[in-house]
Image (cartoon, rainbow, N blue to C red):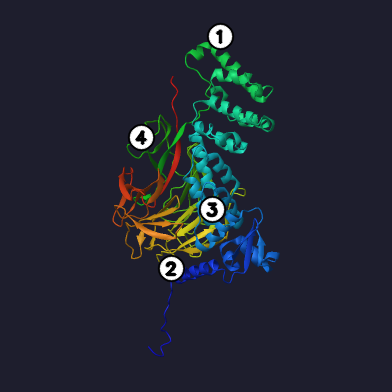
Amino acid sequence: MEGDPDVSLNYADSLLHTCIFQNLCHLWRSSTLCDVVLTAEGSQIAAHKVVLAAASPYFRAMFTCELREASENKVEMQEMSFKLLQDVINFIYTTEIMVTDDNVYELMSIADLFQLSSIRTACASFLMTSLSPSNCLSVLTAASLHNGYNDLADAAIRFARKHLCDVAESEEFLVAPVDVLLKIFQGRILNVPDEGFLLKIIIAWVKHDPCSRLKDLDKLSSVIHLFQVPMDTLVLSKQDPLVQNSNLQLQIKHTINTILEERYDSDVRTIWATGYKEKARRMLRFCDDQEVIFALGGESSGMALGSVECLTLGYDNWKCVIPTAVQNAGGACEDTKVIPTMRTPRSFFAVCYSDGKVYVAGGSTPSSPIATVEVFSVTKNEWTPLPSLPFALTGVRMDFLHGRIIVAGGQSENGTEKATWYLDEKSSKWKTSIPMSTPRAFHGLVSVGGILYAIGGKNEDGTIINSVERYDPNENRWFTVASLHEARYDFGCVAIDHFIYVAGGIGGQQYWLRSVERYDTLTNQWSFLTPMSLARASFGITVSDNRIYCIGGYNGVNYTNTVEKFNPRTNRWHCVQAMQCRRYGVGAATLRVPVISREEP
């Protein structure tokens, strides 16, 4: 061994950074080596500039740029309570903070100021689990004012629409901003007794402050389908002093006259008696929605598929038709539409979904990778092309981040990519973003709390990896986080709340996995859960009713049409109806279709 120049030891101490962090916290608590004092409301707290700069882009810019604070050892924080400042500095050193009803909105503001993504995640998680008729409007208002709360805003809107009768009785309703009410009222899903209820609560809201709100009356009333308002409500509303000489009063008069003409005019009386209604004017309002699971494309018998199957409550098996009218949630699906095939058959493609739309990108046919992108709309029941990817990619992944579609990695003719792109809606072009640290294909990509995570996959030399990295938009860079216990690629990856779930795939020795791992984004730890009943890779994965569905795939021996679902609360797997055909390299998505109560003939 002596004299051998090739002998070396690559040693890594995984506990060193933890010890350093604990020592920094001890130095802070004892006010040792602190070089800056932050003040608020006449009180002060000492800290280390380097620690603050490492944790917050705000402080980094303050202490490294040519600002007055960079050379001073005392900084006054304006318009901030000392208690809140103390909590945040304590969080930077200890990673712990208490989120309550009393401080959550202030914490959202300071998380924006200091650009602390982890506090933003904590606030979103707290508010998501505490939505109620009495607070959903203030949650929506706060989420709309701050960056990175798209999921929270969507959840608050859905909650308010489904509980509008109770929301309208809350104290928040009468003080809610007009733009917040419009976001709620403009939805197709609005659980109200009838359109008359909507008219009444809008008038009540305007009456709460008529001097400043009268100008908003026409804007709000434009969302009401007046021909569905009961006649007695129309008459009473027309006589209300608030609507006198308004455009709404003219519309109500026109509606009343039209209805009376249809009912009693001799030319249309016979038509009316047979059940005629002017459906072109009568737009249905849906009381609820129901989740539908989609299996998209894939490969079967050596052919790339463009067909789509779906499963929902009320279906006894997978079907190629989507319900358009469900009597009650989970009831019989009486009206259906055939789901059109994708414009380009594909397998091993990227898929993401949101707001009644599912997006697919890249992938491959049995002979070559493809670059095309398309979107399916439940409302229109059609596929529409979008701008193609910069080049053909298979094993590519995509998700939403702050409302933008992000595409990352994949395998091209040049090898495994680490590049990322986002779709710029204004220019209808894909634009480059910050590349991942590691090239990845057939990996996982999922966003949680405004942070994007890239997980496992294959790297540039085909090695199956277990590394994980996350992209923080505030820092505009990727950071390495805790690795998977098992290296894997071509697996399923989804998020529920602040957890990321990884299931199946192909392991480091080219064997098919049953194992399931869960990552806690708040503690940076992976843990094993109950494995799947069958090993599988190249399958579709989606979340419905907080259950994880694993669809189709390949188990190393057979291509399969089997489906199983996982309940995170019980840590158990259950069998689900199998698909019509065997699919691998298949995509999966969950969309919502409206539930309506049919009108009696």
Between the residue at mark 4 and the residue at mark 2, the CA separation in whole angstroms equals 47 Å
- Against 252, is 209 above or below? below
Between the residue at mark 3 and the residue at mark 4, the CA separation in whole angstroms equals 39 Å
Q: Which residue is mark 1?
A: 266
Tell me which label, 1 or 4, sits earlier in the chain.
1
Residue 314: assigned label: 4
The residue mark sitting in front, 4 or 2, is: 4
Viewed as shown, does residue 372 lie left or right of 537? right
Q: Which element is circle 4 on?
A: loop
Between the residue at mark 3 and the residue at mark 1, the CA separation in whole angstroms equals 64 Å
Residue 311 is drawn in which quadrant? top left
Question: Residue 279, image x and y in percent?
Answer: 52, 23
Q: Amino acid at mark 1?
A: Ser
Residue 120: assigned label: 3
Tell me which label, 3 or 1, sits earlier in the chain.
3
Q: Quadrant of the N terminus?
A: bottom left
Q: Which element is circle 3 on?
A: helix
Q: Amino acid at mark 4?
A: Gly
The residue mark sitting in front, 3 or 1, is: 3
Residue 461: assigned label: 2
